[in-house]
Amino acid sequence: MGLEIVSPYLIAICVAWFGAHIIKYTVKYIKKEDRGFSSQLFVSGGMPSSHSATVSAVAMIIGLRDGFGSGLFGLAAMLALIVMYDAVKVRRSSGEQGIAICELIKEQKSEVKLPRVAKGHTPLEVVLGSLLGLLIGLIVFLATK
């Protein structure tokens, strides 16, 4: 390996995160749910999962550069699985609970301030985010060989 100006691992993470959010913005724009590009950079939930894209991208490039049998790849794969499980199970569940709480507050005409609700992801959003990340990890690997 030669002198690297910028880490390919960080490149993969940044490209995956930004790419997923560009796709999220495009999906919202097509559905006419546009809330502005800058707000889409930090939105929770949506298609595809940027969390899944980033952890998959870095796991892929670690596997390709350091070996799929390396301890570092094992750690990256474990982290990716935890993040994706959390997006679908924990964050999605808490988002559904948040929506129900907001509906109850509105129904009761309560003066309680509505909480911010982060929706989490559907399994499809996580799978597509992961596939996007794997592709970006491969592209960054090939571009930085």
Image (cartoon, helix red, strand yellow):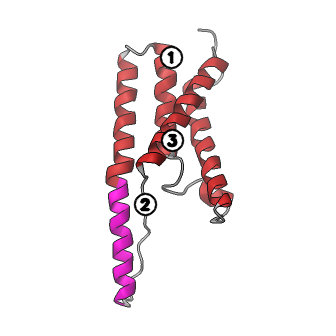
**Tag of residue 119:** 2
Q: Amino acid at mark 2?
A: Lys
Can you give x and y, in whole percent of width and height, for residue 99 in the image? 39, 70
Rendered image: mark on residue 128: 3
Please state which amino acid type lies under the numbered disc 3: Leu
Q: Which mark is residue 64?
A: 1
Q: Report the front residue among 75 and 88.
A: 88
Assign a secondary structure to mark 1. Answer: helix
Q: Are marks 2 and 1 in contact (CB under 8 Å)?
A: no
Write the residue at 35% across / 26% down.
75
What whole-number distance in Å separates the C-alpha atoms at marks 1 and 3? 20 Å
Q: Is residue 87 visible?
A: yes
- Up the image or down, 86 lies above or below 33; here it is above
In the displayed structure image, the side of residue 31 where residue 77 appears, left or right = left
Asked if residue 100 lies in the magenta stretch, the reply is yes
Residue under the point 36% across and 55% down? 91
Vertical arrangement, residue 86 with respect to residue 29, above or below: above
In the rendered structure, which segment of residues is drawn in magenta?
A: 91-108
Q: Residue furthest bottom?
A: 109
- For residue 7, say whether it is visible: no
